[in-house]
Image: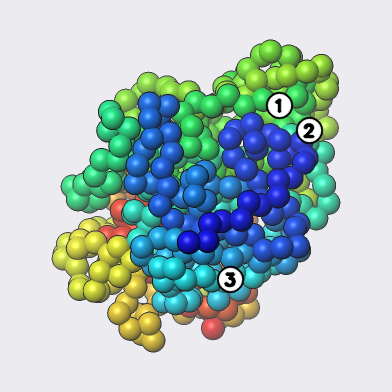
């Protein structure tokens, strides 16, 4: 069987930073296509021996960081080495719908042994991620998730650039997978993993230049956990959320809450040589746990946050609030928990615990791709909408919309300056977002707690 090509590594300090975390960078403007070959993998996640039954994008497992450049066309070839169908979705990227990677809705799934080519030009710079959109309760849970870095068209003034993929694996004491979910958790907050990792390592130690200005890209790719993060040992500012630059750098919120699917870019000033910056999170038990350490090395570069400029804005068009139509979305339990028989496509589960506007999604993969079910709403291309989103349950729901940017409204009902692809609604919370329906197609709208998504909290909106 043909194995993956070894991609050329970038010789830059940025790639070196990524390498320090044990992750290769691929892409970076290379003319040749980027190759991903999802398939079986094993990896020493716990440093107590190999975890078997993983899935990775390379034979040795570790998900590469894909580095693209804003406005530069990219070709990504996916060689499916799995024994099941898959697709790859480019989470957060505003792409033409035929590149969105949703089985049946936007493309036919990639069969076992098949090769498929995605071609697109990233319109926005920032931190994104990639993952299958099929049987995700297995495929993401077993490892198929990676970070995408889209470099700004103009280089930014950072001394290092580190991508940290934050996620759990559900392993027993022997380092092997245990049941990936429990139905009783699926009907509640979801089934948490047991081993928290950064770039597939437990508490890795990375390095960055002392006194340097570091761009730390945090991506939570976990299937369940809402991470309450904290950073200590350095001055830091929040500069982007979900890939989209903030209008001005902000003081880092404590804790920084990142739900499944979300990303945050931080600008961090490293301390003096030998000192450490610690990234940790608070567990549901209230205990804190170390996720990663960044150690300062070399003579101090003497940078500070004083004159830190915002990142250049992305060309995300603004919705027109005055002319916007209101649409209501209620995320709730399912009126009855039974599941229609969808033929078991893409890891469909036999439960429907959740719903959007009281309708549980029939499944990721309707048996007849010509009839993908009914959209939750039909949006007119070029029109603006305010989505009023309400969580009527006590559980957290990170609500993710494909293809269209969600502009968060503030309490005054105006644009807050935050543009996100995933909006976390905690217990009984509501939020309003404005959306300009500029991108025609069927766009999936779902909770990114994958157990919720698979058991009904999903649907799609149609832009025509
Ligand atoms: Cu992260 Cu529907 O995707
Ligand atoms: Cu997505
Ligand atoms: Cu949910």
Nearest the viewer among 177 and 403 is: 177
Q: Residues within 10 Å of mark 1 (few under 14, many from 20)?
A: many
Residue sitting at 43 percent across and 56 percent down?
A: 39
Going by the image, does 128 lie left or right of 172? right
Which percent across, then down, holds residue 195? 37, 32
Q: Secondary structure at mark 1?
A: strand
- In the image shown, does 236 or 130 lie closer to the viewer? 130
Q: Which residue is mark 3?
A: 117
Quadrant assignment, res 234: top right
Q: Which comes before the other along the chain, label 2 or label 1?
A: 2
Looking at the image, the residue that sits furthest to the front is 1
Query: Could you classify mark 2 by the number of other residues whose Cα lies within 10 Å: few (under 14), some (14-19), or many (20 or more)?
Result: some
Q: CA distance from mark 2 to mark 3?
A: 34 Å
Q: How far apart are the two marked residues, 1 and 3, measured between alpha carbons?
A: 35 Å
**Residues at discs 2 and 1 in contact (Cβ within 8 Å):** yes
Q: Is residue 236 above or below residue 189?
A: above
Q: Is residue 372 above or below residue 50?
A: below
């Amino acid at each position: 069987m043909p194995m993956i090509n070894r991609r050329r590594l970038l010789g830059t300090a940025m790639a070196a930073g990524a390498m320090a975390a044990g992750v290769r960078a691929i892409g970076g403007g290379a003319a040749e296509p980027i190759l991903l070959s999802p398939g079986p993998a094993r990896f020493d996640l716990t440093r107590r021996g190999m975890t078997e039954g993983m899935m990775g994008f390379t034979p040795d497992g570790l998900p590469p960081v894909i580095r693209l450049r804003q406005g530069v066309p990219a070709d990504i070839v996916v060689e499916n080495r799995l024994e099941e169908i898959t697709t790859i979705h480019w989470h957060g990227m505003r792409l033409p719908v035929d590149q969105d990677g949703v089985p049946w809705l936007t493309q036919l799934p990639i069969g076992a042994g098949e090769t498929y080519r995605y071609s697109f030009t990233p319109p926005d710079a920032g931190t994104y991620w990639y993952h299958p959109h099929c049987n995700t309760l297995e495929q993401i849970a077993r490892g198929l998730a990676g970070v995408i870095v889209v470099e700004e068209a103009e280089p930014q003034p950072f001394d290092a650039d580190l991508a940290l993929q934050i996620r759990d694996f559900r392993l027993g004491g022997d380092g092997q997978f245990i049941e990936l979910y429990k139905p009783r958790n699926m009907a509640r907050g979801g089934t948490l993993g047991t081993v928290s990792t950064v770039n597939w390592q437990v508490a890795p130690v990375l390095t960055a230049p002392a006194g340097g200005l570091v761009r730390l890209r945090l991506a939570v790719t976990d299937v369940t956990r809402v991470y309450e993060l904290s950073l200590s040992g350095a001055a830091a500012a929040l500069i982007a959320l979900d890939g989209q630059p903030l209008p001005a750098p902000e003081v880092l919120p404590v804790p920084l809450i990142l739900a499944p699917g979300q990303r945050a870019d931080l600008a961090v000033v490293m301390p003096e040589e030998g000192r450490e910056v610690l990234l940790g999170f608070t567990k549901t038990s209230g205990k804190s746990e170390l996720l990663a350490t960044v150690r300062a090395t070399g003579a101090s570069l003497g940078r500070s946050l004083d004159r830190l400029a915002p990142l250049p804005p992305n060309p995300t068009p603004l919705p027109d609030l005055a002319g916007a139509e209101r649409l209501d979305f209620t995320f709730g339990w399912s009126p009855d928990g039974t599941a229609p028989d969808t033929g078991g496509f893409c890891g469909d589960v036999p439960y429907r615990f959740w719903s959007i506007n009281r309708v549980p999604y029939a499944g990721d993969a309707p048996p007849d791709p010509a009839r993908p079910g009914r959209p939750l709403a039909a949006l007119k291309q070029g029109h603006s909408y305010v989505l009023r989103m309400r969580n009527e349950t006590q559980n957290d729901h990170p609500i993710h919309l494909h293809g269209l940017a969600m502009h968060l409204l503030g309490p005054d009902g105006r644009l807050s300056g935050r543009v996100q692809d995933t909006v976390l609604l905690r217990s009984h919370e509501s939020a309003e977002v404005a959306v300009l329906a500029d991108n025609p197609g069927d766009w999936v709208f779902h909770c990114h707690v994958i157990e919720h998504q698979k058991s009904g909290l999903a649907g799609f909106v149609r832009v025509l």
